Image (spheres, rainbow, N blue to C red):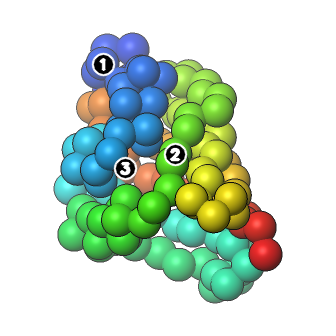
Amino acid sequence: MGTAASSGFTTETLRSGIEGTSAANLLSLYADDAEIRVVDRNTQPSHPMVLHGRDEISAMLDDVYSRDMTHKLEQCVVEGDRVAFSESCRYSDGVRVLSESMLTLRDGKITEQTMIQAWDE
């Protein structure tokens, strides 16, 4: 299994994907067989939303990046083939979203992500 150090995956690579203006940059960081598990108010731990593969992940990212909002990578720790990070987002009307994610990498690509998110209500 590849590691972050040998694969070129860095905090700056992730920052570029998250803070970019299109979903394509972030999508390029995912392996073809990647899986994302999302836990939030609507998709709670016993029934999370699970996305399988780049097509499903692309649809979600396209939706998110089509919104009038900004994304900022707040903190990131890369340790071998594991990554943990915090992301903050802000809609143009001031509504904020905060997410925490844990990633697993293979050959420098994201294969698994668990994301917990909360937003202003």
Q: Which residue is mark 3?
A: 111
Tag 1 or tag 3, which sits nearer the N-term?
1
Q: Quadrant of the C terminus?
A: bottom right
Within the image, what quadrant is residue 78 found in? Answer: top right
Q: Which residue is mark 1?
A: 8
The vertical placement of 80 against 62, above or below, is above
Q: Amino acid at mark 3?
A: Thr
Q: Which residue is mark 2?
A: 71
User: Which numbered mark, 1 or 2, is in the foreground of this view?
Assistant: 2
Residue in view at x 57 percent, y 59 percent: 92
Q: Secondary structure at mark 2?
A: strand
Between marks 3 and 1, how big is the CA–CA gap?
A: 15 Å
Mark 1: which secondary structure? loop
- Asked whether the viewer can see residue 116, the reply is no
Q: Quadrant of the N terminus?
A: top left
Give, as a three-letter code, the residue at label 1.
Answer: Gly
